[in-house]
Amino acid sequence: MTKVSLEGQVVVVTGAARGVGELLARKLSARGARIALVGLEPEALKDVASRLHTDSDHWYADVTDHEAMSRVAQEVKRRFGKVDVVVANAGVANGGPFTSSDPVAWRRVIEVNLIGSAVTARAFLPVLTESRGYLLQIASLAAVVPAPMMTAYCASKSGVEAYAHALRAEVGYKGVKVGVGYLSWTDTDMVRGADQDEVMRELRQRLPWPSNKTYPLGPSVDRLVAGIERRSAHVYGQWWLRGMQSVRGLLPAVIGTVGQREVRHFESRLDSVSVGLVGAGGAADEAARGK
């Protein structure tokens, strides 16, 4: 596919204070893009913005707040004159058995990952339509492979994948392209936070190769950058994820069998597992809500 030069393009990245969002902003800036950072950690966002190569700015906003995100979209347009690309990257995760999980944390994962992505798109689609731009929705391997002990995260990422595919059909005739980015376990604060729970860490290590590895952040983000340059419909952060699409119809049955065996292996320890919103990003989300 033909590459679009990022020189002078205006790119909005949500969840930009750390992890995928931060490194993506840095790599896009290095290619000449002007960057609008959005997130819940104003000091971290300010620090990221100060280290970018190009003109940039940052906004404090909760992606689930429609009024706040609409305001951000208008202010970004006034600040930079246009918006060419939006990366809906903001996300949180929790873990543990569904029946004993914190219902507030479970709901919040759905709200941020699914509803927040839709709120982001609703706010920025008018300006993306003006520029005939590109929306990249960050999903996950969890959209393709249902994993036990991650019901909220899997539900949210399956949801954003389906929503983004449906949206692509709605806005394509207006010149707006929509892509879905898939990442396996990538070395971020979120994944490291989940690994702090012994059972969750061991359960992940017992997954079949190559899904039991933690992958370096840099090469994964490089693939996202390449997808943005090509305005790709599908972007895979790890090389093997593309192949999962061809067998995804078989995976629920396979994972159901394997998952039951693995969860049974940890049965005596499951009562101790209740992972709330993980990592610094989860802590920032809770702080913003006064928890």
Image (cartoon, rainbow, N blue to C red):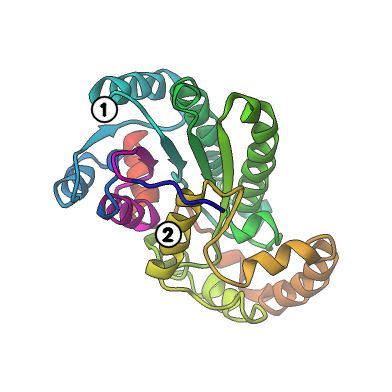
Q: Which residue lies furthest to the front in this view?
A: 2
Nearer mark to the viewer, of 1 and 2:
1
- Circle 1 packing at 10 Å, graded few (<14), some (14-19), many (20+), is some
Q: Residue at x 43, y 37 (%)?
A: 86
**Image x and y of residue 54, in percent:** 19, 45
* Amino acid type shown at disc 2: Met
The image shows residue 79, relative to residue 272, as above or below, that is: above
Distance (Cα) linking label 1 and label 2: 31 Å
- Image quadrant of residue 159? top right
Q: Is residue 194 magenta?
A: no
At x 47% / y 46%, what residue is drawn? Answer: 91
Name the one closer to the observer, 166 or 171.
171
Can I make out residue 113 in this image? yes
Q: Amino acid under label 1? A: Phe
Q: Can residue 92 be seen in this view?
A: no
SS category of the residue bearing label 2: helix
**Residue 26 among magenta residues:** yes
Q: Quadrant of the C terminus?
A: top left
Is 257 above or below relative to 66?
below
Residue 80: assigned label: 1
Coordinates of residue 224 in the picture (x, y in percent): 47, 56
| Residue 221: x %, y % from top left | 42, 61
Left/right of residue 235 with respect to residue 18 in the rendered view: right
Left or right: 173, with 79 as reference point = right
Q: Quarter-wise, where is residue 57 in the image?
A: top left
Q: Can you identify the residue that label 2 sits on?
A: 190
Magenta region, residue range: 7-29
Using the image as rendered, state which of residue 129 and residue 253 is in the foreground: 129
> Farthest residue in the left direction?
50
Q: Tell me the SS state at disc 1.
A: helix
